[in-house]
Image (cartoon, helix red, strand yellow):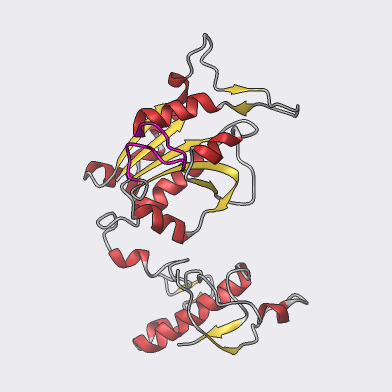
Amino acid sequence: MRFDLITIFPQFFAGPLDYGIVRRAKETGLIEANVHDLRAFAHDRHRTTDDRPFGGGEGMVMKPEPLFEAVESLLGPVDARGAGGSADPGRAAIVLLSASGKPLRQETARRFASLDRLVLLCGRYEGVDERVAQHLATDEISVGDFVLSGGELPSMMILDAVTRLLPGALGNEDSTVNESFSEIEGPSLGPAIEPSWPQPPNRAADRRSPAPRALLDYPHYTRPQSFRGWEVPSVLMSGNHEEIRRWRRQMAIEKTLRNRPDLVAARTIAE
């Protein structure tokens, strides 16, 4: 799979691309990661990639011309649908990293992992000319409800999330199954449960929520068995794999309800 990262700070990626799973995937040829300096596609004297916004306002906005030219140098002319003319729209995506984008989900990463190529546009300043989002990008993605200085960190998050889903990227392929957000289809729901921690007043409304899309990972323990008086749960030492599976399932539900109640209704998930 090929990744193209378009940025005004190409040196930023010298470190993140050289460690862990991403580095190994590069070395084995599983992925190809190319970093492109956006300023190379700005042709004025100062290689300008931003300008003041029409209508006034604080800060600067990234110009459309360099971004369009950079993408078209990789994929060919952009057609009216916003996909590169020389690339199969079903096999490539042009992703604009933006605080105004759709939230990054595990199912988004899985969709990207099914493609041949991702072009990642790293925004900066107050934002990017809206014509980039409307007529160039196939996806506008946000990594959370907060604001960063630019799209470089989010682009690496996407690259990492996608790479680890590619066959051969991990030593154990089951690692992408038994982890947080792996249940992309959403399991069926069973009878209501009463969690042991204090609940907000609107918890009853949660029980009417639709089926969850995902669960957080279950808690993990390793040696020593006893640490500062805190013991590893005895069920994990029982050798009873069915009981361990049930315990892990229940703990994943409770942790999701505690940390991410938006992901799942306050009900036990059917076994």
Q: Is residue 270 left or right of residue 111?
A: right
Q: Residue at x 67, y 23 (%)?
A: 52
Q: Residue at x 34, y 57 (%)?
A: 165
From the viewer's perspective, is residue 112 above or below residue 127?
below
Residue 82, magenta (yes or no): yes
Q: From this viewpoint, which residue is outermost toward the bottom? A: 191
Q: Quadrant of the C terminus?
A: bottom left
Q: Nearer the viewer, residue 104 or 52?
A: 52
From the viewer's perspective, is residue 206 above or below residue 78?
below
Mainly helix, strand or loop, the magenta region?
A: loop
Q: From this viewpoint, which residue is outermost toward the front? A: 80
The picture quadrant where one finds residue 236 is bottom left
Question: Does the image show residue 144?
Answer: yes
Q: Residue at x 40, y 49 (%)?
A: 160
Magenta region: which residues?
75-88
Q: Position of residue 5 (x, y in %)?
A: 41, 35
Q: From this viewpoint, which residue is outermost toward the left? A: 28
Q: Position of residue 98 (x, y in %)?
A: 57, 42
Q: Is residue 127 left or right of residue 184?
A: right
Question: Does the image show residue 151?
Answer: no
Residue 118, magenta (yes or no): no
Q: Nearer the viewer, residue 102 or 20?
A: 102
Q: From this viewpoint, which residue is outermost toward the top? A: 45
